[in-house]
Image (tube, coloured by chain):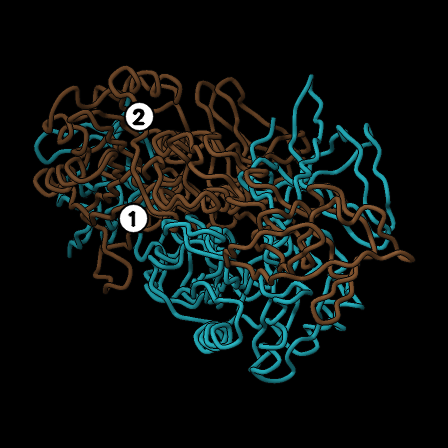
Chain colours: A cyan, B brown
Amino acid sequence: MSSFLRVATIEEARAALEKRWRPRPREVEVPLDEAAGRVLAEDVVSSIDVPPFDRAAFDGYAVRAADTFGAGEESPIELIQVGNVRAGEWLKIKIGRRQCAKIDTGAPVPRGANAVVMLEHSTARAKVVRVFRAVAPGENIAKRGSEIKCGTKVLKAGKMINPQTLGTIAAIGRKYFKIYSPPKVAVVSSGVELVAAGSQLKRGKIYDVNGPAICQAVELCGGEASYLGIARDEPRSLATLLKRGLTTCDVVVLSGGSSAGAGDIAPSVVNGLGNPGVLVHGLALRPGKPTFVAVVQGKPIFGLPGYPVSALMVFYQLVAPYLRRLGGLPQAERARVRAQLASKILSARGRRELVPVKLVQKRQKFYAEPLLKGSGAITSLSLADGYIDVPLEREIVEEGEAVEVILFGGGRVG
Amino acid sequence: MSSFLRVATIEEARAALEKRWRPRPREVEVPLDEAAGRVLAEDVVSSIDVPPFDRAAFDGYAVRAADTFGAGEESPIELIQVGNVRAGEWLKIKIGRRQCAKIDTGAPVPRGANAVVMLEHSTARAKVVRVFRAVAPGENIAKRGSEIKCGTKVLKAGKMINPQTLGTIAAIGRKYFKIYSPPKVAVVSSGVELVAAGSQLKRGKIYDVNGPAICQAVELCGGEASYLGIARDEPRSLATLLKRGLTTCDVVVLSGGSSAGAGDIAPSVVNGLGNPGVLVHGLALRPGKPTFVAVVQGKPIFGLPGYPVSALMVFYQLVAPYLRRLGGLPQAERARVRAQLASKILSARGRRELVPVKLVQKRQKFYAEPLLKGSGAITSLSLADGYIDVPLEREIVEEGEAVEVILFGGGRVG
């Protein structure tokens, strides 16, 4: 209990953690179809020219440009068609003087030719093609390497892979490349009173809320959640799950088992698993006080409160930024909305408070209604569009005051 | 080719499509751990009270409140401890007058008791407990049903499932519930010159860009992409893949095979598959003109241009909103940024033009640099942070003009 006497701010907790643990993204090579939404861990250099050959930009006739000079609507010139180049084919023909070849969009321009006359500027009868407009050398041709030159760096490490970047990687034919690996996160719920959704609820038991909620929150930060299940608040059961988490994952997120009462066994179990153990126990944050942060076997263990609202709010504040860093993802700044506070908030001096609110829009203006049902009330959080961050030194935020609401993702506004 | 003479606006294409096809979300029942990020297709009503019993909010002693009246720092009252209630247990004791039971946070308050004295307001020696502060009836107890009453609608259909909503569903113990099913989308690339990334590039061939890029774009709209591969621009091969798509998926997205030249076989193949067939062929949009929209067997086929930039831009404009509707997802309004145009854009009257731009920030101000490398240049799109929408009637947007940039997701700004 004594470690509870000195609560830490989130910033102090971070500093203490980072002294003992450096979050380092891990690189992994994956095929194209598994990279969506991840972050490039290497500079991608093209080993081919794109396009890899001079390509017709339109359907028409591949010609020697000089042969068309002087052609006009009233004075067409005539060429002899010596071939027909389809897309995907490679014809070994050479276009000589006064010759041409029919060509498809995307087909390779045959040797000798240096321009394409568009179909609509020509007529053909048997092998005789009439051209009604002159073309300049290079006209209607996408030159070899005009989009990407072999040896060019096409994408830089750190780039998020969206359909556009994925397309660029596909264009140069790379199938495998390095991304930052999604961090593996073990999720453990602690509480002898907890049972999993779908089970029968015996007397004295409640359903585990944190397990599923934190697993999704992990995935939203680019992590891979591995739900290890419910530990009874009992040293052996908890130690077994935590050890499994440390062995199989990069980060362990525990919820429950760390309030300052009879059931406060998690911190001591963690200390028994290895050094340095618990670094911070207790946050100057509401909800979120019964939080601990530990490092064991070089991996962090985040001990979140058992109350669902507290657990999620601490997860978003403290854990999420590390998971993003581990995954090489940029920090997602949550969107913010200015609103007018709909009813007074009382806070405690010396404690930062995060107050979930619902946004209501009335005549172009947003009002923030605090949802104060206690830290256990996950339903109130499911109605919340975001939260207000009341700093340490504020005791009262008055009704009508202008506040900034930090929005949850997927939040409905209005 | 004749169908190309009359190009349609995006709005006209949508109207034509929706006359023959109504996008209807499909419901499916899934377990809790598969619902993240989807949308609820049913109102969720709780069949239990949450909490399901009167729960201690703190570690302490369960008491009859009246027994503590008058207690104070200087005048403690004494109670006899008759039990110890741990979380998760259900003790068949009854607290009588002047009696109490030790109780854990979250444990069920035993019969007879109606308040909890916090541990820090008491001392204990053997079975004698001294209470230093009076408690009111109900104090420090989370009453049965105080968070959710049995029979209450806790979530409405249409709600997006984020960790908070998932937690609420977990709290009432529901393991299975209805969500809108992710639409299944067949993705087909057409082009005899195309080969898949990772294969050897023979002469005259290029790598397929659209397959992987469109698959990710489908997933970003909440769809389930099924890549059926590359159809040679040849009726039999194309018909086979399209039929497979119509049989196994809700929507078919084809790219390529629909330009107005020799290789323009896709629309006629589609018309051969069933009625009504092709509804629109040609969009008044750049990039994106060689697009067609068809309905066959009651399912839509979107024929996107073969050029990657065109294919993606048309996908975002035309296909993405339907996939979101089919998945029951809200339409994602893309974020917009005001910027100053860095160099002049020339557009054609009578054609809406979408110009990819890169945003550059200089002294608090954003400048939009058009990336004009032609519709084939996927690399230019991978550098783009968003695009400018130049309407039908504009021919020139001048350098320095204020423009609105519609941002791609995951775009780096600055």
> Residues under labels 2 and 1: Cα distance?
26 Å
Question: Residue B248: percent from the left, percent from the top?
Answer: 17, 40
User: Which of the marked residues, 2 or 1, is nearer the chain's N terminus?
Assistant: 2
Badge 2 is on which residue? B24
Asked which quadrant contains residue A359, the reply is top right
Q: Identify the residue at image location x=64%, y=67%.
A: A262
Q: Identify the residue at image location x=57%, y=73%.
A: A24
Q: Identify the residue at image location x=15%, y=29%.
A: B270
Q: Is residue B14 visible?
A: yes
Badge 1 is on which residue? B211
Mark 2 and mark 1 on one chain:
yes
Against B310, residue B361 (above or below) is below
Q: Identify the residue at image location x=17%, y=19%.
A: B276
Q: Is residue A138 visible?
A: no
Return the chain for callout 2: B
Query: Which quadrant of the rendered structure holds the N terminus of chain A?
Result: bottom right
Tell me if A319 is positioned left or right of A230 in this view.
Answer: right
User: What kind of residue is marked 2?
Assistant: Arg
- Seen from the viewer's position, the closer of residues A22 and A14 is A14
Against B117, residue B44 (above or below) is above
- Seen from the viewer's position, the closer of residues B135 and A386 is B135
User: What kind of residue is marked 1?
Assistant: Gly
Residue A86 — which label? none
Query: Which quadrant of the rendered structure holds the C terminus of chain A?
Result: top right
Q: Residue furthest bottom?
A: A275
Question: Residue B15: percent from the left, percent from the top?
Answer: 34, 16
